[in-house]
Amino acid sequence: MSTTLLWQIGFATLSGSLALVPLLPTLKTWQRTKATSTQPGGSDGYGEEWLAPVDRLRSSIQIEFATLLQLARENVSTDETGNDAHGATRGADENGVPFIVLGPKDHLVEHIPATARRLRQMVLSVRHLDIPGELVCERPLYAEGRINIAHDAAIDTALAGREIVVGIRARVKRWAHADQRLDAAEGAVLFGCVSAGREISLARRARFERLYAPRILFGRQQAASPQMPVERLPYDPPPHAAVVDDRWIVSGDLHIPAGHELTANLLVSGHLMIDRGSRVHGSVNVERTVVLAEGARVHGAIYAASSVHIGERCQVTGPLVTLGSLRADAFSELGQPEHPITVSARKIRVAESCIAHGALWARRIGEVVADA
């Protein structure tokens, strides 16, 4: 091989290496997040870790209160003298925490003073449990049926075998779990983790930190008007994109025009704009902001160092993690029923008629808004 040819090969290799130097931060970010890009948020992500306190309380109830709950189902309790009596059972657990066990015909308001504003006993019910308005409950609540938390009440923790209803402006301080469904009324504040075995429904102006359920409904659910099918054009890599295996490494911003489709994992050092109706089949890793215009879809994960805006009728089927804020407009869907995902952002604002599947974590605060 001639010396001239060797110089040409060496120069071409050096030029290609230098061309990738500006993209090193993006490549490092890709390696940093590559391990988590396959993490299914709804099954192996944050959600199951969040349920650990729920499992501990459930196990404690099954061990410590099984006999008392069975007596309460039979509407028989034991008073302080050891004689059988009808009504609630009072006592203290092995740690000295006071409790009340309610039978199927007992109501909490009948067993607390009418002027009470704070409840320092743990409450267990074999049927439904109604928490009066403006009452502050400092101990765990448990019901084998439904728990109703009236307006302006505040609870620490709650576990229900069926449903939980959080009333107007009511507050959850640590966590609440319903084995079937949890509904939060307008203005409810849900700190900590709120989870359900089937579905969570949040009214507008409800605020949250962590949500976990197979199906999460935001605000009033209205059917979107049908859209005409669109034939999408293939989108080829732009000149400022280096193609490495299945990845497009883009120096600067990337704008995918409306009505296009591509299959690749995107590493973008600037902003990413996916225009109306376009599709990306692959993961997206962006150093700046991500914007999905109306009807756009990403069939993969999204990682953004800045904010993410999801327009109307959009869909993201993989985990969505941003260091900034997330905004989702009406009729958008995060995850799928068969593929729950993890969504994490500093602040989350979700419009009514949106649906999510899996785990949502607003590291600062999340809110359901009438119009995002």
Image (cartoon, grey):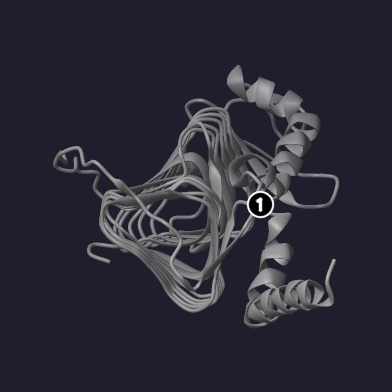
Residue 43 makes an appearance in the image: yes
Q: Nearer the viewer, residue 70 or 276?
A: 276
Describe residue 219's horizontal placement relative to residue 249 as left or right. Answer: left
The residue at 67%/21% (across/down) is: 71
Q: Nearer the viewer, residue 38 or 140?
A: 38
Describe residue 192's horizontal placement relative to residue 271 as left or right. Answer: right
Instruction: Give how far across and how far down residue 348 sits, in percent.
Output: 44, 66
- The quadrant in which residue 247 appears is bottom right
- The quadrant in which residue 351 appears is bottom left
Q: How many marks?
A: 1
258 w.r.t. 144: above or below: below
Look at the numbered disc 1 and give the secondary structure of its residue.
helix
Residue 80 makes an appearance in the image: no
316 w.r.t. 33: above or below: above
Instruction: Give how far across and how far down residue 6 sits, in percent.
Output: 81, 73
- What residue sits right under mark 1 in the picture? 46
42 w.r.t. 188: above or below: above
Instruction: Give how far across and how far down residue 285 sits, in percent.
Output: 56, 64
Hey, which residue is sitting farthest front in the picture?
2
The residue at 66%/52% (across/down) is: 46
207 w.r.t. 227: above or below: below
Label 1 is placed on what type of residue?
Answer: Tyr
Q: The C terminus lies in which quarter of the figure?
A: bottom left
Q: The N terminus lies in which quarter of the figure?
A: bottom right
Describe residue 152's horizontal placement relative to residue 101 as left or right. Answer: left
Q: Nearer the viewer, residue 178 or 100?
A: 178
